[in-house]
């Protein structure tokens, strides 16, 4: 087997939208990048549809999607129901827009081609082991196998290695400084999700379903809580009435139906739904970002670093922003993999987006304790309302206006037991959000440990740093 040795500034592993946009941003900031992808480059990343708030593209320095990549018009309505249909909430103008992830990543890959002088892409290439000098990685072994059967061993030297390869954190788990402080996912911190685009066999049956939920074609219906507090079934019948988008998500704890199981059950109950034209499923981390996900020579982003908003398991936007922040920060240093450079990227993310994700992790853990009837009651009473829900959908910290306070007060009088659960959690969310703004700006393991333990006390969770 031929061996090829190469040297660059940064190696990025994983050409999903998170990895591709990170490589693009690193190149724009003047760094030379090698991007590795295990599959064919046109099969990289999720092959299904996803919803993202438009502002996240702006922050990640990625052009906003337009049709056909974007799958809705200027406005999209959301209707939320509890599992029994008693609670109801409408959001007329959703802060999230659906997009075709295949088309989106194809656009990013094409944009990378215009930066050939700074970005080299190797697909069909599997990352292997890292070599270290002390605790810092300096070389990555990889193996490329082309569809024609040619094999090449790559020895990649770099100042910084970026793990954007997904949930398992292949590079992160090899780092002596990170693997012991980045805990494995617990079942309750994992979402089993599935998305399908199906034909509509019977338009009249589809219309009857929409009528039951007082919805119009093109509106998203989300039924929450049918498989425990943290579960979602979303249905969007196209305006043309010829296709339907389905999305399911549940806790991967063995006590509830999986995302694919919930999908199968729903489709069996709705005979107007036809065969799947596109489908994808997987596990998504839903805990807060790791307290530390960078070290000299290495950084994790996306699912590998748990850059996923916990309340609805959306990770693409957070990962892309993490990649942009990484590029902005490390490119300022002569050595982009130095302790100062990688810590700068870490603290910038934690103070900006980590604060939001950490706060919503508090609410996510409450939601997992709720029964379906309690969710119905919270929707009916207005404890969960369009105001506070929209902020979570937009992946921004909730803001409580006067109308929201009045609605919450009214709901609290009607359901004091639920209010006793809900109120303290919201207060805790704001305390956690404020605490992230004090993440240590300069490298200090002592200060990081103290910050991590206080974060655990405030959130009611566990500290990552022992």
Image: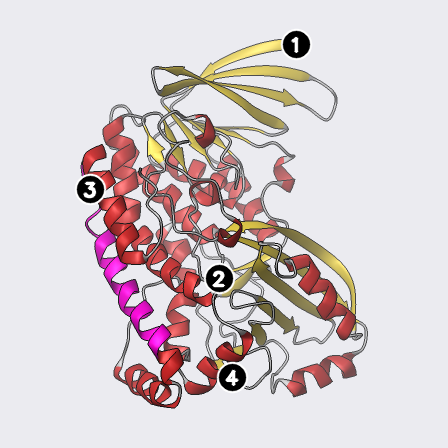
Give the position of the N terminus as an image quadrant. top right
**Mark number displayed over residue 312:** 2
**Mark number displayed over residue 440:** 3
Determine crowd level at label 1: few under 14, some 14-19, many 20+ residues with C-alpha closer than 10 A: few
Judge left or right: residue 142 versus residue 318.
right
- Single out the mark in the foreground, 3 or 1: 3
Q: Against 86, is 424 above or below? A: above
| Residue 93 coordinates in the image, percent (x, y) | 46, 76
- Sequence-wise, the earlier of marks 4 and 1 is 1
SS assignment for the magenta stretch, majority: helix
Q: Can residue 147 be seen in this view?
A: yes
**Mark number displayed over residue 33:** none
Determine crowd level at label 2: few under 14, some 14-19, many 20+ residues with C-alpha closer than 10 A: some
Q: Give the distance between the C-alpha atoms of the residues marked 4 and 1, in whole angstroms.
A: 62 Å
- Say which residue appears at 81% left-offset and 73% top-offset: 201
- Mark 1: which secondary structure? loop
Query: Residue 99 magenta-drawn?
Result: no
Residue where numbered disc 4 is placed: 88
Q: Against 425, is 105 above or below? A: above
**Mark number displayed over residue 1:** 1
Q: Give the distance between the C-alpha atoms of the residues marked 2 and 4, in whole angstroms.
A: 18 Å
Pick whichever, 223 or 349, lies toward us: 223
């Amino acid at each position: 087997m031929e061996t090829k040795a190469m040297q660059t500034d940064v190696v990025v592993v994983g050409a999903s939208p998170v990895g591709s946009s990170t490589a693009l941003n690193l190149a724009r900031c003047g760094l030379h990048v090698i991007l590795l992808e295990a599959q064919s480059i046109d099969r990289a990343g999720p092959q299904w549809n996803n919803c993202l708030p438009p502002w996240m593209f702006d922050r990640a320095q990625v052009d906003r999607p337009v049709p056909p990549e974007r799958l809705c018009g200027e406005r999209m309505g959301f209707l939320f129901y509890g599992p029994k249909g008693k609670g109801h909430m409408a959001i007329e103008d959703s802060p999230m827009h659906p997009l075709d992830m295949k088309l989106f990543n194809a656009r990013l890959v094409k944009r990378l081609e215009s930066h050939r002088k700074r970005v080299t892409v190797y697909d069909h290439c599997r990352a292997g082991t890292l070599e270290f000098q002390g605790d810092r990685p300096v070389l990555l072994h990889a193996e490329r196998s082309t569809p024609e059967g040619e094999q090449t061993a790559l020895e990649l030297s770099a100042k910084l290695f970026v793990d954007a390869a997904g949930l398992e954190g292949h590079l992160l788990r090899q780092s002596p400084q990170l693997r012991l402080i980045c805990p494995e996912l617990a079942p309750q911190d994992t979402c089993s999700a599935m998305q399908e685009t199906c034909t509509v066999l019977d338009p009249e049956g589809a219309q009857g379903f929409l009528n039951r939920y007082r919805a119009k074609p093109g509106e998203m219906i989300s039924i929450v809580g049918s498989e425990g507090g943290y579960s979602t079934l979303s249905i969007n019948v196209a305006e043309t009435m010829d296709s339907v988008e389905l999305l399911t998500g549940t806790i991967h704890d063995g006590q509830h139906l999986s995302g694919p199981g919930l999908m199968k059950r729903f489709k069996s109950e709705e005979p107007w739904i036809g065969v799947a034209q596109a489908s994808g499923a997987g596990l998504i981390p839903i805990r807060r970002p790791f307290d530390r996900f960078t070290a000299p020579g290495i950084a994790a982003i996306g699912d590998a670093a748990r850059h996923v908003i916990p309340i609805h398991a959306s990770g693409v936007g957070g990962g892309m922003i993490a990649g942009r922040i990484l590029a902005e920060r490390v490119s300022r240093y002569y050595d982009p993999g130095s302790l100062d450079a990688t810590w700068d990227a870490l603290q910038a993310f934690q103070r900006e987006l980590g604060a939001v994700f950490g706060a919503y992790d508090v609410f996510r853990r409450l939601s997992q304790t709720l029964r379906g009837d309690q969710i119905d009651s919270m929707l009916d009473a207005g404890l969960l309302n369009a105001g506070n829900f929209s902020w979570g959908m937009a992946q921004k910290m909730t803001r409580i206006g006067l109308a929201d306070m009045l609605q919450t007060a009214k709901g609290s009088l009607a359901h004091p037991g639920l209010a006793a659960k809900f109120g303290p959690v919201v207060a805790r969310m704001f305390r956690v959000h404020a605490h992230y703004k004090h993440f240590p700006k300069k490298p200090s393991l002592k200060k990081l440990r103290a910050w991590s333990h206080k974060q655990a006390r405030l959130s009611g969770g566990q500290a990552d740093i022992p």
